Amino acid sequence: MTILLTTLNARYAHASLGLRYLLANMGELQSQTQIHEFVIGARSTDIVEKILAYRQPDQKFIVGFGVYIWNIVEITQVVAVLKRVAPEIVIVLGGPEVSHETNDQEIIRLADYVITGWGDVSFPDLCQQIIKGPQPLMKVHAGLQPPMNEIKLPYALYTDQDIRHRTLYVEASRGCPFKCEFCLSALDKTAWPFDIDAFLAEMESLYQRGARLFKFVDRTFNLNVKTSLKIMQFFLDKLAAAPHDPVFAHFEVVPDHLPDALKEGIQKFPDGTLQFEIGIQSFNPEVQSLISRKQNNDKAAENIRWLCEHSHAHLHVDLIAGLPGETMESFAEGFNKLVALGPHEIQFGILKRLRGTPIIRHTEAFQLAFDPMPPYTILANKDVPFAAMQRLVRFARYWDMVANSGRFANTLPVILSESPFENFMAFSDWVYANTDATHRIALDRLAGLVTTWLVEQRGMNKETVMGLVSSDYAGNAKHKQGNSSTGEQKAPAVAKATPQRQSRHLAA
């Protein structure tokens, strides 16, 4: 018997935590189980060829796929080809994309079995039935949630290659107590913690093997302050012991829950060692109420401002456009409020209809129209028609290029001025009208577009603008914008270097 666990990651740097959990909990089948990860964009026939290379003559072969919103289309193609060339292979699906609305998915029709929800113990149990019998009668199996202390932690399964070249995903807890209707965690009853001492022992082992970049996937890292402090102290101890070889940690935090004890710990982290992902999503109280999101907006804003002014944490703050009840005007107001708080990055997301999420209950009342193809992005609603939603989509893309890239740090405040949303939307509309492109705009061309817009649309002095944009090129000779009117090359500004581990994380 051979069992292969596989998935298609969005990038090579993303190491699948889910597959490693499955392998860690395979019990007596672990020695017969292997992992092979692929990256989206690979040809389906090439993937199938590599999968079939694991098959042993005259033995059953089980292939388990981790299916997510970003790989559902390509994995469907892979499964279809597999079933054409090797129909005897047993295909088992798992993951959030196949855990809900199972009746209308082509990939489920093609597969032999599906496990919905938690697969840590259910997948090895299903494999045992397939091998030893009796053969499972049902195609769809609801995954059982075991006690947290019965789940074997997977971190020893990160290879030395993973540690050197990939983001290591870790979790101190699963689930979320909040009920935000756009999120699959709305279906959870609570958050379930792992034993903190056992977890930190695994982190110690990873650290001793050379791991320095840890991305926590906990939905609510700062929910239990006592646990949060123990985890933060673990990293602070490492930083104190080896300041020349620092760690980098990423946490997702609840924006309105930052007690003084946490603030005190956060302030101890030096620059380039700590990143927070903060989900604001909307500052509109009516929208928050509609989507069952509980958030103290004043406290959240106060905490973000404090983090910007009194800590070295890199802040990545999320907003979602297209939520039911959110108009262009109210979203603009929230965006401008967030810009004024000064986070390092604003992730401008467009609402997606994740399978199983309660957001669909608003479909009729708010005329929600979603793309039928993954990632099921909203196309329009009663407050934001299709054309306006497309403008928001382009805004998000250009915002990543100009603002979140960090390449226009000096020029961005001039673009945004006193009305950030309105001014950047004007810039976005103009760029699209003049390029008909939202992807693959080379940096030199983008810098030229920024320069032209500031000169022609905002009426700024050309020499002033060219000096400003040139200062953002931080000494990269091939990106110098040209000479001043005196014929002398302006000295570029010196950029602050981003630590390599942080650069790798931010790109992931």
Image (cartoon, rainbow, N blue to C red):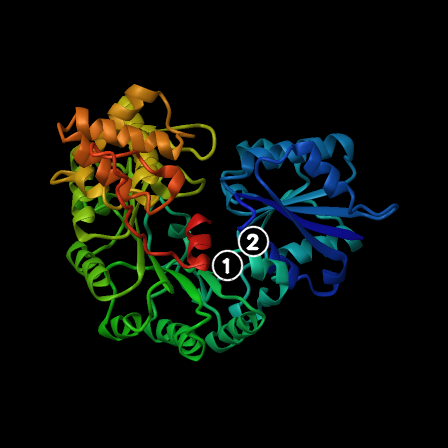
Q: CA distance from mark 1 to mark 2?
A: 7 Å
Q: Position of residue 176 (x, y in %)?
A: 38, 58
Q: Position of residue 390 (x, y in %)?
A: 31, 26
Q: Is residue 440 left or right of residue 23?
A: left
Q: Secondary structure at mark 2?
A: loop
| Label 1 CA crowd tier, 10 Å (few <14, some 14–19, many 20+) | some
Q: Secondary structure at mark 1?
A: strand
Q: Position of residue 479 (x, y in %)?
A: 37, 38
Looking at the image, residue 9 lies above or below residue 363: below
Can residue 129 be spotted in the picture? Answer: yes
Q: Position of residue 7 (x, y in %)?
A: 61, 45
The answer to which of 67 and 122 lies nearer the viewer is 67
Residue beneath the point at 46% across and 49% down: 508
Residue type (three-letter) at the residue carrying disc 2: Ala
Residue beneath the point at 53% across and 60% down: 145
Residue type (three-letter) at the residue carrying disc 1: Tyr
Residue pointed to by mark 2: 15
Residue beneath the point at 68% across and 57% down: 125
Residue 489 is drawn in which quadrant? top left
Residue pointed to by mark 1: 169
Residue 404 is drawn in which quadrant? top left
Mark 1–mark 2 CB contact (< 8 Å): yes
Residue 160 is drawn in which quadrant? bottom right
Looking at the image, residue 390 lies above or below residue 250: above
How many numbered marks are there? 2
